[in-house]
Image (spheres, rainbow, N blue to C red):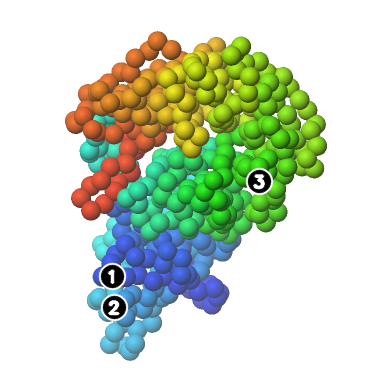
Amino acid sequence: MSGIDPDAVPPFPIYTLHLDENEPQRLELDRMPLEPSYGQNPRAAGIEAVARKAQSQDLEAVRVRIHSTTGDIWDMIVTADGQAIDTTKPADEDEANPARRRKLLLPIILAIGTLGIAGGVAAALVVTDDGEPETWAIPGVEAQLPVALPGEYSSRASWSVAVDKDSDVTALESGHILATGTDGNLVARDPDTAQPVWSSRNAPSDLSTLVQTQWQSKDVLAAYVGRNLYVWNLQIPEGQNRAQSHTISVEHQWRVDLNGQAPMIDMGDWIVGVAGDDYGIDQLVIPAGTRPLTATPQGGVITASQDNFHTIDSTGETTNTIAYSTDDDIDTMPDRQWMLDDDHAVLGWDTEEPTLSIYRLSDGQQVATSSVGYLPRQNTTPVIDRASQSAALGDIALSWGSDDAAIHEIEGLEISAVHDDTAYGMYQTSGPVSLDITDEEADPEPWDSYNPDDPAPALVTDDAAYVIAPQLDQTILYQARDTTRSEDTQ
């Protein structure tokens, strides 16, 4: 701490922290709400956010004024590497060591070793009243999971945080774990530490449709809920850790597909909405008698007719046509369509024997096909794991890998997560189960659960499973490590 020279720190900028001591979870830095990690001291979260902001703005040290709802005001200097000192001037010489101020202030002084905006592991030290540093603990470590998971996962959390009561959880391509915080903000966290990396306001709690995609060559997150399409620009300006959000109104009869090459809105009447300037929507006319599948990064659309895939450019001209084959009894354009990735779509025909088929758009190859009991509704949201080329569409499991393509219908199975060719969900006859997607003859495999209605994981990644469960008046997101993977890496 003695390395800071207060006289060398410029008088401006002055960051402002507002702390509500009656409601410790309420905290603001320069009018922006902060969310402490589960179990983290809110004052520590505030000073930590100051250090991060100073670092992102290339400032070696900044002045901070802390306002409490009790009327107390403190001044501090915090460096970008986390050192902090109290610079509050006493009201008079007799108040040179005010007990109350020191008691509240000293526990929040931090020395942050590595604090990465891009998601590195964060190691923090807390200086206590006796001057001895303590390592900052990852929130909710070793918390007991209230539900049982498959045997390879730990029954104790590697971390756990409070989230919105209706929150979902998903993983980004960067590995960050995304959920809706208790304040309604969208929060991306480091998967190893639960450290918030960035956040955004105006977030829906339902993240089931959220994907990482492109909007006019910009990296974005996109999700649609109800009558809104949400888009977050991931090209965060230097010096900020908040993703800018945009909300686009969507009519209830429109169909939105975000899982293809670029976001697309089927408006009906052969009109398709594609990504426009300033997060607007451009309208494109497609050939009558075709179904739109996906927008293209160049502002065009790929459509499907009875037996061809057509690429339409941004001017409405057809620039490419690729033939595809169907069963003999199919003589119409598809009745249902969902994109699985940039080059694969699942098409459905509501014939006497309803049929689902997976196609590769680039060459028209039929990857898999099967009769099903019924076609899923068009508004069914697929649960997709692109890495393993597998997905779930209602109670239908899909795989489009070159060696293990399959369409597998399991009536009564509600799938919540897909990873590494395995689906996890709730089976109406046995509670939580897993299913090998690549084996069309496989049956759901239950695991020992505490209760028959214990949920399956909401998300599974290479090394962990994630569960959201209520705990008294809170809702908690738990990370449970795959212990077999941990043993393999030792």
Where is residue 368? Give x, y as percent. Answer: 55, 15
Q: Nearer the viewer, mark 3 or mark 2?
A: 3
Is 383 or 316 nearer to us in this picture? 316
- Decide: marks 2, 1 in contact (CB < 8 A)? yes
- Name the quadrant of the N terminus: bottom left
Q: Which residue is drawn at the image coordinates 35% and 84% (left, top)?
A: 90
Q: Which mark is residue 70?
A: 2
Q: Which residue is drawn at the image coordinates 72% and 44% (left, top)?
A: 284
Q: Which residue is drawn at the image coordinates 37% and 66% (left, top)?
A: 27
Above or below for 201 versus 17: above
Q: Amino acid at mark 2?
A: Thr
Q: Could you tell whether 74 is left or right of 295 in the image? A: left
Is 31 or 412 nearer to us in this picture? 412
Task: Give the SS element for disc 2.
Answer: loop
Within 10 Å of disc 1 (Cα), the crowding (few <14, some 14-19, many 20+) is some
Q: Quadrant of residue 59?
A: bottom right
Q: Quadrant of residue 156?
A: top left
Above or below for 209 versus 353: below
Q: Earlier in the sequence, mark 1 or mark 3?
A: 1
Mark 3–mark 2 Cα distance, whole angstroms, equals 53 Å
Residue that badge 3 annotates? 273
Mark 2–mark 1 Cα distance, whole angstroms, equals 7 Å
Task: Give the SS element for disc 3.
Answer: strand
